[in-house]
Structure formats: structure tokens, C-alpha cells
């Protein structure tokens, strides 16, 4: 396809009000499917064309509202984005489209996408796009309309092993690929999931146990594991790529971030236990002095 024709296709999609008007009145599924094919063709040559992605989302929304469920289309869309992401690195528009699709996924599709996207994430640990997509999938599992409100506690118990597996997998990647900020951002999200959902759930299901211990024992166990990871990262020997300072910085800022979340919730006091580690703020000032205001806010 020549670039002149490609430019014409993009121009058409940029002025798609007339197209939308015709399609919305016809209500012909075959026409909508042809539009998806047209968008796919344009994206194969211009994978970052915002007008093409925007038009594609509108077509899918119309199909969902007027014709059928989107199980098959969701599968095809996920594969399309995967193929485009392989050829066009850091394509935020493509991944944004994939994240948008999550709201149309069934529970089984969400679980399947968590499984399928894992290998891609392992091969692209510096690319936050895929980890952001995984976070959208996890939120769908935690906050989606898959269960009735009175079944929420039992549902969270069933999903807890999946969250635990994600946390352990993330730790393996952190230790294997030092100094990758995307991995630590993902871990912050997983920690928030624990504080918001699973720690509160454990207290709800075992109130007498929590009262006897004086603290949220589930949160206490979680913090023990996170402090062990902090110790490991602070004592990692230097490698040939000089990633150990970045690893120490991300680990220290992560644990300070978690301590702020816990303090705000009134769940547990972490500051005393952090004294055993040393002056994390001094470490952060040394490794990344340009972010001093951020470190001050985390350690207040």
C-alpha cells in the first residue's frame, strides 16, 4: 500500500462523523466488521494512529450495544495489540486500547489474559505498558461485576492465591532484573491491593484473632515479607551494569510509600521496624538527590 493511500485512510478516519452516522443508522454487523478490518489495515502501516484506534473503539462499542457479546472480538483485539506491540515498542495507544477492552471481558477471559500476557511481560520488564494492562485485569477481577455483593468475601478468598502468585512472580523479576522501575511500580499496586482488599478481608473473617494479636496479623505477615525484600535489595552486590544503586533507591522509596499507606489507614505502625534498616532518607538523598522533595514527603 502506498503512503498516499495510507494518508487518505487516516484522513477519512480523522473526519469520521459521516461514517459513524451511516453505520449507526444501518445497524449492519457486516459493515461494522469491515470497519474493523479497515482500521486493522491502517494500523498495520501506522500503529500509532490515534484516529484509527479511536474509531476502532467506537465500532466495538456499537457492536456491543447492538449485536452480540464481544468474546470473539476481544480475543482478536488482544492478539492484534500483541502483534502491533511486538513491532512498535512502547505503543501507548495500542496498549490503551487493550486496557479499554477489559471492561468487556468475561471472568474466564480476564484470567486467560493474565496468563497469556505474563510471558510478554517477562521479556519486556522495562515496558510499563504490559504491567499497566495486568493491573487493569487484576482490578477487573477485584472490582468487576462478576459476583453479587453478598458473595464478595468468598470471591476475594478465591482470588487471593492469584494475587499471591503475582506478588511472588514480581519479586522474582525484581531480583533477576535489577533497577527496573516498572517492576517496582507494579509492586506498589499489588501492595495497595493487599491493604485495600485482602488485609481488610482477613480482619473481617477473623476478628477475634486480630483482636488478640493487637494488630492486623495478615498485614503484619505481609510487611515481614516486604522488609525481607528490602534487606535483600539494599545488600545486593554491585553488578557490571551499575544497577544496584537504582535497585536500592526503588526498594527504599517503595517501603516508605507502603508505610505512608498503612499510616493513613491506621492499620499498623511501621516506622519502628524501619529503624532497624537504617536511614532510608539518607540513602535516597545520596542515590537520587534531584528528588529530595519527594523523599521528604514520603518520610514525613
Image: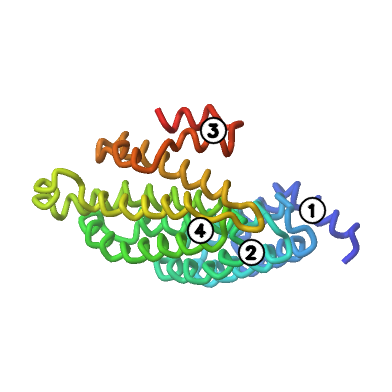
Tell me the crowding category of disc 3: few under 14, some 14 to 19, or many 20 or more residues within 10 angstroms, Cα based: some
Residue 247 in picture, x, y percent from top left: 54, 50
Query: Splitting the image into 4 quarters, where does residue 161 fall?
Result: bottom left
Q: Nearer the viewer, residue 244 or 9?
A: 244
| Residue linked to disc 3 | 285
State how far apart marks 2 and 1 are (Cα). 19 Å
N-term mark: 1 or 3: 1
Mark 2, mark 4: which one is toward the viewer? 4
Residue at image position (53%, 43%) is 249
Which numbered marker is on residue 166? none
Marks 2/4 in contact by CB < 8 Å: the verdict is no
User: Which structural element holds mark 3?
Assistant: helix
State how far apart marks 1 and 4 are (Cα). 41 Å
Residue 252 in picture, x, y percent from top left: 46, 43
Judge left or right: residue 208 versus residue 215: left
Which numbered marker is on residue 174? 4
User: Which structural element holds mark 4?
Assistant: helix
Marks 2/1 in contact by CB < 8 Å: the verdict is no
N-term mark: 4 or 3: 4
State how far apart marks 2 and 3 are (Cα). 40 Å
| Residue linked to disc 2 | 81
Q: How many marks?
A: 4
Residue 33 in picture, x, y percent from top left: 64, 67
Marks 4/3 in contact by CB < 8 Å: the verdict is no
- Vertical comparison of 210 with 283: above or below: below
Mark 1, mark 3: which one is toward the viewer? 3
N-term mark: 2 or 4: 2
| Residue linked to disc 1 | 10
State how far apart marks 2 and 4 are (Cα). 26 Å
State how far apart marks 1 and 3 are (Cα). 48 Å
Judge left or right: residue 168 versus residue 83: left
Amino acid at each position: 500500500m502506498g503512503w498516499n493511500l495510507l494518508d487518505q485512510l487516516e484522513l477519512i478516519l480523522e473526519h469520521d462523523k459521516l461514517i459513524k452516522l451511516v453505520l449507526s443508522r444501518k445497524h449492519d454487523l457486516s459493515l461494522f466488521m469491515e470497519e474493523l478490518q479497515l482500521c486493522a489495515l491502517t494500523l498495520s502501516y501506522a500503529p500509532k494512529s490515534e484516529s484509527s484506534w479511536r474509531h476502532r473503539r467506537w465500532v466495538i462499542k456499537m457492536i456491543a450495544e447492538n449485536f452480540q457479546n464481544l468474546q470473539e472480538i476481544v480475543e482478536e483485539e488482544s492478539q492484534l495489540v500483541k502483534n502491533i506491540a511486538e513491532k512498535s515498542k512502547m505503543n501507548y495507544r495500542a496498549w490503551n486500547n487493550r486496557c479499554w477492552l477489559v471492561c468487556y471481558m468475561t471472568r474466564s477471559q480476564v484470567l486467560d489474559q493474565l496468563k497469556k500476557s505474563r510471558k510478554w511481560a517477562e521479556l519486556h520488564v522495562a515496558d510499563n505498558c504490559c504491567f499497566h494492562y495486568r493491573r487493569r485485569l487484576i482490578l477487573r477481577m477485584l472490582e468487576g461485576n462478576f459476583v453479587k455483593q453478598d458473595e464478595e468475601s468468598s470471591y476475594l478468598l478465591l482470588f487471593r492465591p492469584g494475587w499471591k502468585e503475582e506478588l511472588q512472580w514480581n519479586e522474582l523479576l525484581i531480583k533477576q532484573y535489577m533497577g527496573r522501575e516498572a517492576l517496582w511500580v507494579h509492586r506498589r499496586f499489588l501492595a495497595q491491593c493487599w491493604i485495600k482488599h485482602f488485609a481488610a478481608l482477613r480482619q473481617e473473617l477473623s476478628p477475634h484473632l486480630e483482636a488478640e494479636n493487637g494488630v492486623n496479623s495478615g498485614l503484619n505477615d505481609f510487611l515481614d515479607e516486604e522488609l525481607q525484600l528490602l534487606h535483600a535489595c539494599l545488600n545486593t552486590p554491585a553488578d557490571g551494569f551499575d544497577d544496584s544503586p537504582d535497585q536500592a533507591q526503588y526498594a527504599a522509596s517503595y517501603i516508605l510509600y507502603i508505610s505512608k499507606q498503612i499510616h493513613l489507614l491506621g492499620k499498623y505502625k511501621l516506622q519502628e521496624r524501619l529503624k532497624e534498616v537504617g536511614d532510608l532518607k539518607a540513602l535516597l538523598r545520596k542515590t537520587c538527590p534531584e528528588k529530595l522533595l519527594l523523599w521528604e514527603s514520603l518520610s514525613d
